[in-house]
Structures are given as structure tokens and as C-alpha cells.
Image: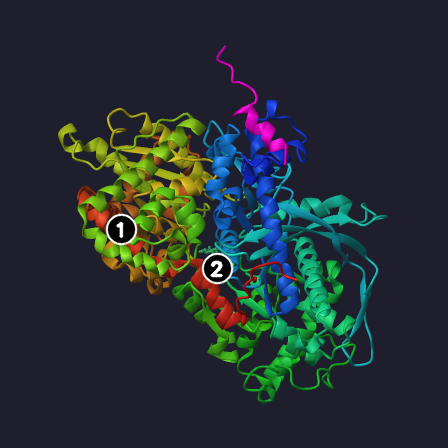
Amino acid sequence: SGKEKWPKGEEKVWRAGMRSVDKNISDVTRSVVNHVQTSLARQPYNLDDFGAYQASALSVRDNLLVNWNETQMNYTRKAPKRAYYLSLEFLMGRTLDNALLNLGLKDQYKDGVKSLGFNMEDLLEKERDAALGNGGLGRLAACYLDSSASQELPVWGYGLRYKYGIFQQLISQDGEQLEAPDPWLENQNPWELPRIDVTYQIRFYGNADRVTDGSGRAIWQGGQEVLAIAYDVMIPGYGTKTTNNLRLWESKPKRGFDLNSFNAGNYEGAVEVSNSADAITSVLYPNDHTFWTAASLADILRRFKNTGKPIKEFPDYIAIQLNDTHPTLAIPELMRILIDEEDLHWNQAWHIVTNTFFYTNHTVLPEALEKWPVPLLEHVLPRHMQIIYDIVSAQSYIFHRPKLISSDRTCMVSFPYVHPELTADVAPFRFFLQAVEKKYPGDRDRLARMSLIEEGAPKQVRMAFLACVGSRKVNGVAELHSELVQTTILKDFVDFDGISKFGNVTNGITPRRWLDQCNPELSALISKTLQLSPGAWLKELTKLEGLLPYAESKTFRAEWAAIKQRNKERLARHVEVTLGLKVRTDAMYDVQIKRLHEYKRQTLNILGVIHRYLTLKSLKPAERAKANRKVVFFAGKAAPAYYIAKLTIRLIVNVARVINADPETNEYLQLYFLPDYSVSLAEVLIPASDISQHISTAGTEASGTSNMKFCLNGGLLLGTVDGANIEIAEEVGESNVFFFGHLTPAVEDLRYQHVYHPVPIEQKCPALAQVLNQISGGLFGGDGVYEPLLNTIRQGDYYLLTDDFDSYIAALAMVDEAYLDKEEWIKKSIKTTAKMGKFSSDRAINEYAESYWNIEAIPVPDGIVA
Ligand code: 6GP
């Protein structure tokens, strides 16, 4: 009848799986069958791929649980110093394949599900991405968890359990981005463990009354309380038993909770808003931040207290990493706990705090630096605002009496906290200003610049400054970026604190997901060539250098190129299955995938594509036939309220429509915007790329991490001299990278010129003017809809497209020329992969462990931990 036979696979295998004594089937098969029957309560007769995925996931989870329990018991027993990674985002992607790899069970499960009639690759596709974040910062957190566990480091993540992942991106008929919710928990999540035994009550609103005994204490009462409930996600290390924890908090109203007075249930809504909105442009709302940081700290403190150590040893056992400023409220929260609940003196509390926290900055864009209105904080978190004011006044006191600061900075406030002039009716903030006026008559600018509170209506708390002042160390995420942090946004603090507080940890990526999992064929070729087991180089990525001599081998190059080709075919199949579009595979693949943002300059890329199209159109057929064939891919989401970024998407989609349909040129140039960019989509795109674009205005991209992923997979890089591009070029050699554009020191002056000495684009950059005119003229339809986007270039041009366009086009031409020499190109590709060892997140996490957190590896012993 053509129907599938039921059950899938061999009936006798299923039956054997149901009998726990049958020796003829593997443990894996038995465990999967058992979960089908018990956990899912399903029959083999109607089991579909999704059911088989669920049963496999539950079975793998059993394995993780054993290791996870042993790891946690071992930590409890050994009580080492631990690090906690507080991040509002964790972009984990899918788990099953990663768990199988890290457990070393890939083959067993592949065979196990095969004996039941299923194909593991199909099951893997059934898993939904855990997309609890927007972009680079969230994916970095996920890579760091993988590396922490792989390096056997006692690190836990703390985050929020969003009910909705980042929005699902749909593209309308007109090419507009539409946002649909991503209810990722709808189908149940086998990877999380609800811990109804781990809950905390978190207070909001109410009143904070100072105790008038000079201790700085206050009593905070009233308001509302919300319950925080823990959900644990197991994080297995690669090739080790160590299985760490990612604890995500869910909020729940307390019984008897008055929803009306809690903003009509807006709490859940607020959580969703903060999740779907771009971190850079989101409306700030402190509730979810507080809730999560307060629950995490309560949990950390409880665990610390169980060790029986005195509170003053807190920083000897705990390091807390702030992933950008989102968790900064942890600083006043820990002060509150120590002063109000633990009865410590302000100085002791401040000493503990400033030896516990570490702050990583991920952007120097001024519009992305978090500021929270004082009146809002005063309303929602009255006690925290008090403490922030007290830090301000302590801060002012330091300026006031600079000699009192100890040289090792461990006692920044090493004097009686309550200043004699500080009376109840003089607000600390006013006191600060008075102190400034009195002691620094000539340098009021500096003190206003440095205050944690920015003047204005309303006043605002500068979260980056609070994070900096309250942390032991501060770092950026690539060398150039860290230098910019130190010379621009935090310059005054470097002058004040000394440079040793500030550092750099260049970002990294996990080679497990970003090479072995996403590019299994390349990984296998590398193992074969280096004559190493995957474990021997995936955990020591600099071993890739052993590939260098093979760049000279013609047969090796042929194998290398064949894998790239098959990865292109895999991508083309994916596009055909998901979008019904036919992509040619006999072309260079050029990819730009990242959040849509003006500073990342997707606009420059699409204008370059149009320029190429117009050039191809102008050629005679014989000339055109010599052109390098190219397919350009874009993917990325724009913040829902980011009008210009959404217009860029619309332009890309409509340009694609025109040029893909043009029979004169579509053999040479195709363009695709792949909707709903995700970790899983990146895993298909990255291995297929020949060249990828990282073309931010110099000085704006803190690091970038996809640049590392592309290069690790043998894709070459076209970029500006920005972020981690610079360090990649240092490693792989400048001859293997295509650089263009103005350098960071030139940017300020160019912007000044745009404003005060503008030159018409026709004169400055005729090629670009022609492209803009074609868009305005309606070549891609739109009826004038793109004018606001084009005007950002015509007027002001803050991101320097008019300055960089010509050198960008020249760089693209160099890429074409290089690609035409196939053998040379493959050599470049091999050499690039070979030199990417530095960018393993194992290296990065070890830097944090050694130079920042001061923690050590704690291997789980063999046998059962007692
Ligand atoms: C990003 C940076 O834009 C990117 O350059 C960097 O690679 C990544 O962080 C990881 O460090 N920043 C964010 O995603 C962000 O939200 C506040 O910054």
C-alpha cells in the first residue's frame, strides 16, 4: 500500500526493549523504549520523529543527571572557590547533539534509534532552539558554559527562564519583518529540571527606612513579594564527567498576591518585553533584572552559608561575573544583604562586594550604555536606590580625601562611612556636589562626568559606572575594544583606580559546537590528518597548526574543497526545503549573519550587491561570462522598534527579488535573505561560507564572534580593522584576510567633516551616488519607502558609508580575483583554520579563571562520589 509498516523498525527489538532482561539489545535502546512507554506513555505503533526525539532526549538526560549529581556532590564536598556567571541572555541553541557529543554517546544513540527505525539526524531537527537572548553576548555566555564544564571549572550560570524565546522573524510579501512569539516551552522542555524546592521571595516597592544609629542600615518593608522558582539546565563538559548547572528563574505571584496593585500583572509582560527587545534599544524596566539578580544572590549566599565559613571570607569562595551591565543591581543587592541582614559595617560590606564582582563590557556605543531613571528605581527598589546614593557619597568622599585610599585599593572606603557633614536632611547626592565644589573647584567637569548619577530630568543612574566602581576588575572583549573602554567610556576611572584594575579577555567560541557538531566532515578530516582523536585537538585547539604543512598537498586540498562543496549543497538543500528556493552551488558563498544594526553596516553590503548587479548589467555577455559567480546570504533580526534596521531588511529582500529574477545576470549573482536567524541556522550557514563579512564602522564592534566561527570552518574574512578581526588577522596572517576602510582614530574627524564640511555624495563617491539614485528611482520598487534609510547616508552619514564605500568595492574585487585562483584560495582556507587555536573559548575561560576569578579545575573523581 506504500504505507509505512508499524511499528517502525523491528518489532522484536521493540519487544526486547520492553523486557529489561533481554541481553540482545543495547542499554541505549532499552532506555529509549522505556521512556517511550513510561515517560511519554506512548505506543511504538504510532511513534513519530518528535516522540522518538523526546524519548531519546529523556534517555540522554538520565545520563547527564548521573554526572550532574556527582559533580554537584563533589563541589559540595570539596567546597572550592566557585564562579557564577550572571547573564540576562543564554543563546543555547539545541541540546541533544551537544549532549551526545560531550557524553561520547553519539554512535551508541545513532545505532540505538536506528534499531528502532529512526534516523538520528531527523530526530535532532525536531528540537527547538533555546533562544534566550538576542545575539553575541548571549551566545558568548553559552560558549563559556560549555568551556567551563569542559575545563572542569566550578562555574554556574544564572539567568531568566523566559516563557518566550526571542521573537520568530517572518518576512511579509513586501519584505517587511514581522515578529511572532516563540513559545519554545510549548512542547515541554526535556532539558530542564524544575526545582520547586528552590524558591525565594523577592520584594518590590515598599519603604526603606534608615536606622538612625549611624550604621547605614535600613529596614525595607511593605510593597509586594514575588516568588522566584529555580529551573536547572545541565551543562555537560566535553570528554569529562563534569556537568555544571545553569539555573534559570521563573517568577510566580505569591499566594494572596494583589495583581492589580502589581501593575495589573505586567510583571510577566515586562519579562517578555525585555526578552524580545534588542538589548541595545530596549525599554528599560528594572523588575526582571532585580528579581533575577536578587534570587541568584540569595541562592549563592545560601550555598555559601552551608559551608559554614564566616561571611568575611565570601570573596575567597565566590566570584560573580557580570555579563555586561544588566545584572549590575547585584552590587547594591549584595550591599543590602550584608548591611541590613548580616549586620556588617558599610566598609566591610563594600570590601566584600568590591572583591566579589567582575564586570565585562560588551559595547562602547553610547546609546547602548544602560541608564536607569532615579525616580523609577526609587519607586521599585527604594532600598537599592538609597544604597546607590550612599555609594555616590562614599565616592564623593574619596574625591574629597584622596589620600585616604589605600594603594592596593582593597579598602576604597577605609574611613568612617558616615561623614560628619552628612546629616539626615542633606541628601548624599547634594553632599557629593558640595564636596566637588569645595575640593575640586577647577575640575568640576571630571566629577560630574564620573558621578554614578547623571544630572538631568530625570536623573539617571549610570549602570556601567556602578558596575565599574563595584567590581574588582573590568574587562573588554577584544584588544581594541578593551583599549577603547579604557580610553573613552571609563577613562576617568582608569585615571582614578589605576590601570591594573582594567584588562582584556578576547572572546572565544566553543570548537565543539562550532566545528565538530556543525561541520562533522571537516572535523573527521582534521582528526584523520593530524592522526589524533577528536578529543586531543578539540580541547587543545592550537593543535590545528599541525594542518599547515598539508596546505601544500594537492590531495589534501582536494578533500578540503570537497567538504566545503558538500556543505554548500547542504545549505542549498536547507534553503530549498524551508523556502522552496533553488540556490546554485557552483558559486562563491558570501555570508553576513548577525543582528541588524546600522553600525554593523548590512546597508554597506546590500549597496555593494546593487553596485555589483549594475556593473554586471552594464557588461557585454562575453565580458560577463568571465565574472566570478557569487551567492550572497544575509540573515539576522532587527529590534522590533528599530525602523532603519527594518528598512534595511526590506531593501535586501526586494533587491533579492529583482536580481534573482533577472535572466541576464542571475547566473552570476544571487541574493537571499534567510528569515528567522538562529543558532541552528548559523550551524548550517557557517560551514558553507567561502567569505564572510564583518564590516562595522571601525571602533564600533566590540569583538564579534561569528568572525571566529567562519574562520575556524575555513571561510575567509572580509572586514574592517575592528574588534576581533584584528586579532584574527594577527593569527592567520594579513595576506589571508581582506581588510578595507578607515581606521578607528580617523572616525571622529570624519564625522566632524560630515557635519561641518559636507561634500555632496556625487562628488565624494560617484559609484555610491549611482546606487542610491537607482534605489530612489524605484529599481527595487518601494515607492519611496527607502528614503529615510538613504537619508541616513546622504545626511550626517554617522557610520561612514560614504567614506568606506570605494575601498569596500575594491576589497570585494580583490576577493573575486583571489577566488578565481582556486588552489591558492584553498591554501588560504586551510591556513586560516590552522591558525584559529587562540579563539577557543577554552582559552578565554581559562583566562577568566586564572586572572580574574581565581578558581581552579575540580575534576570529578572516578567512581561514585560519596
Ligand atoms: C556584543 C558585541 O556587539 C559583539 O561585538 C561581541 O562579540 C559580543 O557582545 C560578545 O562579547 N554585545 C551585545 O550583544 C550586547 O548586548 C550590550 O552588548
Image point (31%, 32%), residue name: 670
In this orientation, which residue lies closer to the viewer: 374 or 418? 418
Image point (66%, 62%), residue name: 866
Q: Is mark 2 within 8 Å of ligand 1?
A: yes
In the image, residue 527 lies at what x, y percent? 33, 50
Furthest toward the left, the residue is 622
In the image, residue 256 lies at what x, y percent? 86, 48
SS at circle 1: helix
Q: Amino acid at mark 1?
A: Ile
In this orientation, which residue lies closer to the viewer: 53 or 315? 53
Disc 1 from disc 2: Cα separation: 32 Å
Within-10-Å neighbours for mark 1: few <14, some 14–19, many 20+: many
Q: Which residues are magenta?
A: 1-20
* Residue linked to disc 1: 830
Q: Is residue 378 left or right of residue 788?
A: right
**Which numbered mark, 1 or 2, is in the foreground of this view?**
1
* Residue linked to disc 2: 363
Q: Is residue 308 left or right of residue 127?
A: right
